[in-house]
Amino acid sequence: MATVFVVLVGTGMAYLLARKSFKGKEILDILLTLPLVLPPTVIGYYLIILMGRNGLIGSTLYQWTGWSMMFTWYAAVLASFVVSLPLMIKTTRAAIESVDKSLINASYTLGHSELTTAIKVILPLSKKGIIAGTVLAFARAMGEFGATLMVAGNIPGKTNTMPLAIYTSASSGEWSRANLLVLFFTLISGLFIYIANKFSTRVI
């Protein structure tokens, strides 16, 4: 679910940054890239400040609905979304910026609107970068640990993810289970990197 939102939001943000010039563009780029370099615990802290029961957004949500996102699977989705979004934006933006501008101008010359040009020219020509970004974002979301632990906890059968399961198994001395999970996770991650490289060879 985090990847679905990442693709929708990330593609839109990447297009905005690649094709538009506006005041505050660099600031927006910095804000969207920060989760890529900040420690996961810092990201988790920011999410608590924003979405916690007493948070800037979470308090209003709780007052209106009596529901808090914290320590639910929704919080795990949110944490995975935030940490993986920069990868999608960076990869897709590079792909969009690499599209031949003469093809874009030709589309405008033929009377197509910006929306039609984006859908029929820019995005199709950027598909390798979009797919690569999606794969990398999915792999990053799947591997999220620190932020997820802070906002969603490690509730068995509810909010525990594979990285949290590995941590729990290692902490409790269940080394056979931990080894199996680590091996599986490593193989899956390697496969995702291979797929991403196949699509991004000519983009990044």
Image (cartoon, helix red, strand yellow):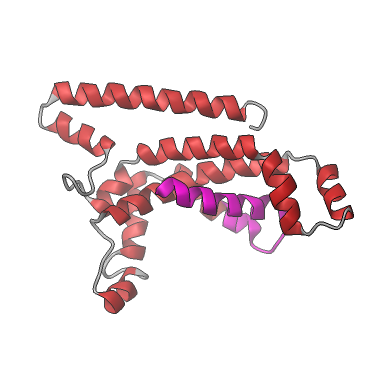
Q: Which residues are magenta?
A: 1-29
Nearest the viewer among 30 and 60 is 60
Q: Is 116 within the magenta?
A: no
Q: Main secondary structure of the magenta part?
A: helix
Task: Name the residue located 32 percent from the left edge and 48 percent from the top edge.
Answer: 147
Residue 46: quadrant of the picture = bottom left
Q: How many numbered marks, from 0 up?
A: 0
- In the picture, the quarter occupied by the C terminus is top right
Nearest the viewer among 128 and 76 is 128
Q: Is residue 166 above or below residue 69?
A: above
Q: Position of residue 29 (x, y in %)?
A: 59, 53
Task: Name the residue located 30 percent from the left edge and 24 percent from the top edge.
Answer: 184
Task: Name the residue located 56 percent from the left edge and 26 percent from the top edge.
Answer: 197
User: Is residue 134 in view?
Assistant: yes
Q: Position of residue 152 (x, y in %)?
A: 25, 52
Nearest the viewer among 8 and 167 is 8
User: Is residue 35 in view?
Assistant: no
**Residue found at the far bottom of this picture:** 64
Left or right: 50 as drawn, with respect to 85: left
Residue 16: quadrant of the picture = bottom right
Residue 108: quadrant of the picture = bottom right
Q: Position of residue 69 (x, y in %)?
A: 28, 62
Q: Is 3 within the magenta?
A: yes
Left or right: 12 as drawn, with respect to 35: right
Q: Position of residue 186 (x, y in %)?
A: 35, 24
Left or right: 103 as drawn, with respect to 6: right
